[in-house]
Amino acid sequence: MKFGYEEDKIIIKDFSAKVEQGKKIAIVGPTGSGKTTLVKLLMRYYDICSGEIKIDGINIKDFKRDDLRSIFAMVLQDTWCFNGTIMENIRYGKLEATDEEVMKAAKVAQVDHFVRTFPEGYQTILKEDSTNISQGQKQLLTIARAFLVDPKILILDEATSSVDTKTEMQIQKAMDNLMKGRTSFVIAHRLSTVRDADLILVINEGDIIEQGTHEELLKLGGFYEKLYNSQF
């Protein structure tokens, strides 16, 4: 495929990859390299200039946009909660979900244990600015939402730079649980977290310049190897 925000300024010049169901794909690159561009193309916030993107053999242009996006769930670095109970905030992922389904998702997402420390439990009201829970707890709530949706494909932004080590471990465990058996695209900030990825896509200045496993890319001795060594 090829893509450019303008037809005469192509940034993704010649990219081809096959992703098998249930595999973990890491998207890596320097800050501002265009890691989120690939995510926007998958979900058709932009259309590619030539070539095809297929899911289960079907061109994504043959889906209605709403139907296409219902296949995905996203857990982003910028978490969002609204003024309402914790139960309502998790249920936002699937409005028809029962209380039991919400609590089941919360347990797998490492949420249940901290919710039960509040006197009102799942009926605790989150403030408009969510100041009565921590950043890490908000991240876990958004992971619980994703569990509730039970998506085919996950998009995860694994940045946890603003949380303490214990919470970071809980978030990592919750994300690992969420990825089990699902195809996942992980926007990676620290390369140590994606050494086990089935495929790593290396992006620089908008273009996918290298792809392979961690070991293959290190042997290549190219951009990824320099990026990896600069972090360690």
Image (cartoon, helix red, strand yellow):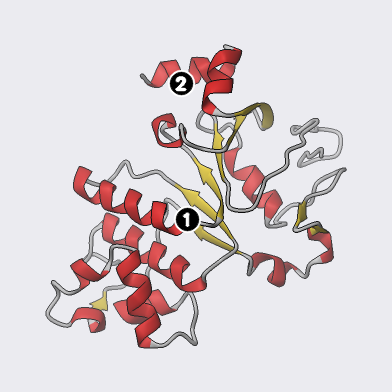
Which of the pair 113/89 is nearer the observer? 113
Seen at 74% across and 52% down, the residue is: 46
Closer to us: mark 2 or mark 1?
Answer: 1
Q: Is 221 situated above or below 19?
A: above
Secondary element at image label 1: loop
Left or right: 81, with 66 as reference point: left
What amino acid type is highlighted by mark number 1? Lys
Q: Please identify the quarter of the rendering in which residue 105 is found.
A: bottom left
Disc 1 designates what residue?
Answer: 180
Q: Are there few (<14), some (14-19), or many (20+) residues within 10 Å of tag 2?
A: some
Dot 1: few (<14), some (14–19), or many (≥20) neighbours within 10 Å? Answer: few
Between 227 and 154, the one lying in front of the other is 154
Image location of residue 124, percent across then percent down: 22, 80
Q: Name the mark on residue 228.
A: 2
Instruction: Describe residue 162's horizontal placement relative to residue 30 as left or right.
Output: left
Q: Which quadrant of the figure contains the N terminus?
A: top right
Q: Is 142 situated above or below 202?
A: below
Task: Determine the residue positioned at 32% across, 78% down.
Answer: 103
